[in-house]
Image (cartoon, grey):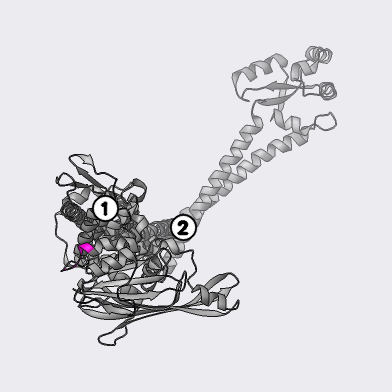
Amino acid sequence: MSDRETDADVIPNQQLEPLTDEEMALKLSMLAKAQNYREGQEKAFDDEIDSLLRLHIK
Amino acid sequence: MKFHEIALSNFRQFREAHIVFGDETTSGFNLVVGTNGAGKTTLLSAIHFALYGDLLTSLRSERLLNETVFEDLNPGDVGVVTVSLKFSHLGSNYLLRRSTKVKREDKSEIRLDESLSLTNADSGESISPPQRWVNNRFPSNLAKFLLFPGELLQGFFEEDKFGLLARDIKSLAGLDKLDFLADSAERVKASIDDRIRRIPGDETVGRLLEQKNGTNLELEKIRERHKDVANALKDSKVELQSKNRILNERRSQSALLQEIDMSKKTVSRLEAALNEQRQAKVAFMQNAGWVSFVSGISETLREHLKNMDARGLLGSAWPRAAISELLSSGRCICGCSLEESSPPFEAVKALLSENAKVEATLPYQALVDSLSDGLLNFDAATATWQKFISDELKAEERLESARATLGKQQNELADSGADSYLSELVNRVLELETLSIPKLEQDLLELGNKVAEKEDAVRILDEKWAEATARQQNHGPLLRQHASLLRVLASIRADSDSLNDRLRSELKTELEAALPPVYDNRPVEVEVSTSFGIKISRNGLPMSEASGEEQLRAICTVSVLNMLAKNYTLPGQSDDEKSDFPLVIDAGFSHMGETFRQQALEFLKKGSDQVVILLLPDQAAVPLRHIGPQGFASKHLLHKFSTGVNPNPAREYEKIGDLGVRVQTFESDSPYTQIEVLTLDS
């Protein structure tokens, strides 16, 4: 286990922070992708979400 | 959305049928009236087929192709099923046309190619891709409620159907999409967590840096030493070159110096040789000492010696024959381990005889070495001993000669005016050539190997360091992505929670408003759980399941869901893609009392722009009685649907007086029964 803080316990503090422009763009892209999601395509969908993440957040 | 017209070709019971529901000007209320098997549910299924390409779930195992057409086909022949649907949505008119080729295969059919087209009827523009356009506006999971087979009304709120209901309610607001998006983001986050875990921590990088710096320091020290030694070697070589040059200039003197050095070495060597010679002589005499040959011994002693065991006297090494032979010549030997000149020897000699005379004194070992065939060889023993003496003498002479040569050379050097510097120079050159430079060269070689070893270690550490720092540099984006994903995930969850709250609250409010207070006029209480479990109670008691009340609740719920669906834009949907279904309710009224039916109709109308109710003829009178601006139920219609006699049988499509009702009658070919579609004008 890394000594880095990667767990979900950081979420509550960050919930209040507004999303940056990039994060908002990421969220909207993710939502748009989700609209066309079909059941049984989890892996491909995860890959797309990962790509979107790397596209928007550098 | 309103269905205006639907045209069926070869679709199940219908060879050809063209059914008009109305248009934008009509009320959007239709009754489809027909006996069992007349094709009411088929009509509902045709709408479903036009929109999604398949039949309602309850009919999926049924044949698509019209029975008569099917029977007319030979096996392998192909028939075509077509459904065209005209509808309006958000002020525009559209024509959706789906056509499927069906091949007869003995008793079954195989669907072949399918074509789908969607046209904006106002602009003539073709919309592509049509299915996506339809799905985005009229999600298929919503269709199961809105194109509503009556059997779903039964047990609508039951536990085993509830998961489905809850999931579909969630889909109204796109909550399901937010859910699986959050799930996916969680998985991606876990993958990033994993990647972050594999990045070396600061501690690892710090340790590597420490090692790298430490090894570099060691390398530098070794390089320094290497450099020092290399410089020393270089200096030594320069010095040697320089000193050799000086020596060359003073060649004669330096040659003499070198000769002197050689002479010194010779003297030293000869001294060592002489020393060695003397040590050999001492070793020759070791333990045995000296033996003297004595002549002129007394007769008494001679006889005495003859009778005794000479070996006992002289030692076991002496053969008896040798002793006898010696005694017969009037001589004897006298062994003594003492020095020749020592007083005890003189004392022994005195015992022998006054005339006794020592002829020779030899080392005991020389006599032992000279024994030959058991007899003493006095001459040989003497020669052996003399050789020691002469060798020693010769060594002394050689040494003296070398010393003399050295002295002579030193005198010559002194006479040549050579200074002590020259002497030092020669010595230094010798030292450089024989000691310093070879040692420095050896040291340099060893240090060079150590430098190479350390350089290798440093190179390996450098590579590890570069890899670790490269990974660390990757930290930035990865940690940013992680943090952003967490925030976006939190935002999606917050949206989901807020949407969940909103949808539950609206569902509760709308349901409480919609569900009628029955019997005792007390309002119903609706509880909607976070997972969209719906509990309806009155006075804290569950509502009755009797008298069609459950169907009423189900219809109300469906209507409310449809109404709510219009309020939500799904994730990724634009406003013009909001869902807006007509409600088509199949056989929902069969077990309802009149009051419930009236209420149900009102709620249905409230929830949708269009409500199509499929009814058996004997049920039609009830809704007719309650709907319509002037009492939709005219005595004509009531008469028609209560007696089965059409007051205007001659006309296929008829507007009945001023009642605002149009009646369209058509027949399906199986089982040859009539369907009537009633449209309320406004």
Instruction: From the viewer's side, name the closer residue of B90 and B498.
Output: B90
Does residue B307 lie above or below B404 as drawn? Answer: above
Kindly indicate the quadrant of the structure image that contains residue B566.
bottom left
The percent position of residue B269, horizontal first and vertical second, equals 54, 48
* Circles 2 and 1 on the same subunit: yes
Dividing the image into 4 quarters, which one contains the C terminus of chain B? bottom left
In the rendered structure, are the residues bearing label 2 and label 1 in contact, judged by CB atoms less than 8 Å apart? no
Q: Magenta segment range? A: B625-629
Q: Is residue B418 visible?
A: no
Residue that label 2 marks: B434
Residue drawn at the location 49% of the way across and 65% of the way down? B62
The percent position of residue B247, horizontal first and vertical second, equals 40, 67
Mark 2, residues whose alpha carbon is within 10 Å: few (<14), some, or many (≥20)?
few
Q: Chain of mark 1?
A: B
Mark 1, residues whose alpha carbon is within 10 Å: few (<14), some, or many (≥20)?
some
Disc 2 versus disc 1: distance between alpha carbons?
128 Å
Does residue B383 lie above or below B449 as drawn? Answer: above
The percent position of residue B590, horizontal first and vertical second, equals 33, 56
Q: Chain of mark 2?
A: B
Instruction: From the viewer's side, name the closer residue of B249 and B296.
Output: B249
The percent position of residue B441, horizontal first and vertical second, equals 44, 59
Residue that label 1 marks: B593
Q: Amino acid at mark 1?
A: Gly
**Horizontal side of residue B549 vs B457, given as left or right:** left
Nearer the N terminus, badge 2 or badge 1?
2
